[in-house]
Image (tube, rainbow, N blue to C red):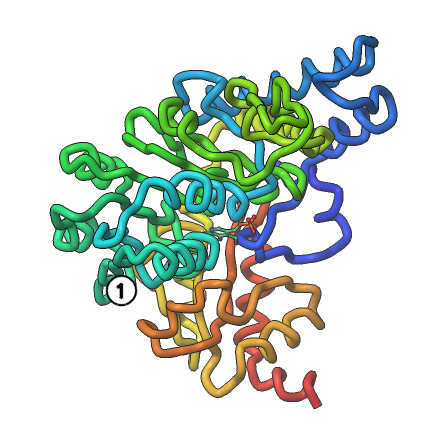
Amino acid sequence: MNTEDFDILKTGIDYLDNAATTMKPKSVIKAVTDYYKEYTSNIHRGDYNNSIRADKEYETTREKIREFINAQSKEEIIYTNGTTNGLNIVVFGFMQHYLKPGDEVIIDQAEHASNSLPWIVLSKKIGFKLVFAPLDKDYKLTVESIKNCITPNTKVISIAHITNTIGDTRDINNIGKLCKENNILFVVDAAQSIAHTKIDVQEDNINFLAFSGHKMYGPTGTGILYGKKFLLEKIQPIEYGGDMNTEFSSTGDYSLKELPTRLEAGTRNIAGVIGLGAAIDYINSIGLEKIHNYEISLHQYLLEQMKQIPNIKIYNPSTQGTIVLFNVDKYFSQDVAIYLNQLNICIRAGNHCAKMLHEVIQDNSTCRISLSFYNTKEDIDKVVEALRNQDKILDTLV
Ligand SMILES: Cc1ncc(COP(=O)(O)O)c(C=O)c1O
């Protein structure tokens, strides 16, 4: 679907690594190059036309994002450089001052490093307890599992909406309800879901949400941290510098601007933010629901084909989504990826930055195919055919 909007796909690659990053449509590339070619300037600082235009485009993206996730106000949308940055701001700018020894934070073993390592580091520093909600027999995280972990000491639940390995979609609506009932802060890592399924931060009772622009057809180095306004106001910035202050003096007095600028120190990725605005327009022009439905049917097709190939172990055969995690019999996952690369097929191999998952699935390294709406049945047929010819893997390596 819409493959023609992506010049890079005309180079002949079979790109099946969309959980790592997505391709950029022409309109996003144009928005970025227009800024560089026609009105490069800084924002919030210039009294001339190019700067005023950059200001306008930059702030328009904020409104587009607000609408996209249904935040209450534009002040709740903070520009970051990605999901990792957003989650670190939550953990070290907010939680570091909020959590006390004896408190409990619930995560799980399928979380990406961005939503586990900051918590691990902070729990060592503060002495709160990190509780790992058990995954079920299919390595999915259920509402029931989370419910069973909640105690009077639970202060935060921080989970991926969709993980980048098993790819299961967590029921954030019901988990959000649980959080509300129990006075727990709900942090959602939306890196893998934002481009694939609808998120409504108010409806889902989300307190903090982080995602990356590059995984939603936007430029690298862009991201969003959403937070409810009263919580964002309590964040102690982890960066201080230009634009975010109102005044400071050699006596040590200083004051900071209002949200969102107080959390956006220095010159941000202006071109990237403008490109992100174009990415939102692009997604809206197709429709998230249409994207979602197409991807689900393509994934179903992939799964059916893969299940028929001998010697393939699929770790998430019951997951509905865009990701298939697998290994080919005796072959090391990276060897499989190298073999597929010879055929111009791009997949990911390794631990996928989810370094605790092997404690559960008992394999350190897996292959991952992750789809997007611009993939086609032909893309799938190509990788399936290559995996059927798995005896050629060794030939390409020696
Ligand atoms: C579930 C999940 N969370 C967080 C991240 C981190 O995203 P970024 O590297 O863009 O900060 C990723 C990246 O793959 C991810 O898949």
Name the foreground residue: 237 vs 109. Answer: 237
Look at 80% across and 9% down and name the residue there.
Answer: 47
Percent coordinates x, y for residue 350 in the rendering: 53, 71
Outermost residue, bottom side: 398
Look at 70% across and 17% down and name the residue there.
Answer: 44
Q: Measured along the vertical axis of the image, is residue 279 above or below residue 394? A: above
Look at 39% across and 68% down and name the residue there.
Answer: 356
Which residue in the structure is indicated by mark 1? 138
Is label 1's Cβ within 8 Å of ligand 1? no
Q: Amino acid at mark 1?
A: Asp
Percent coordinates x, y for residue 65 in the rendering: 51, 25
> In this orientation, does residue 126 appear?
yes
Q: Measured along the vertical axis of the image, is residue 15 above or below residue 310? A: above
Name the foreground residue: 71 vs 255. Answer: 255
Outermost residue, front side: 251
Left or right of residue 240, residue 129 in this image: left
> In this orientation, does residue 289 appear?
no
Name the foreground residue: 212 vs 85. Answer: 85
Q: Measured along the vertical axis of the image, is residue 214 above or below residue 381? A: above
- Disc 1 on helix, strand or loop? loop
Percent coordinates x, y for residue 94 in the rendering: 40, 39
Viewport quadrant of the C terminus: bottom right
Look at 82% across and 14% down and name the residue there.
Answer: 50
Q: Quadrant of residue 129?
A: bottom left
Name the foreground residue: 18 vs 219. Answer: 219
Viewport quadrant of the N terminus: top right
Left or right of residue 158, residue 240 in this image: right
Q: Measured along the vertical axis of the image, is residue 398 above or below residue 23? A: below
Q: Quadrant of residue 148?
A: bottom left
Query: Number of callouts in the render?
Result: 1
Outermost residue, right side: 37
Percent coordinates x, y for residue 98 in the rendering: 32, 40
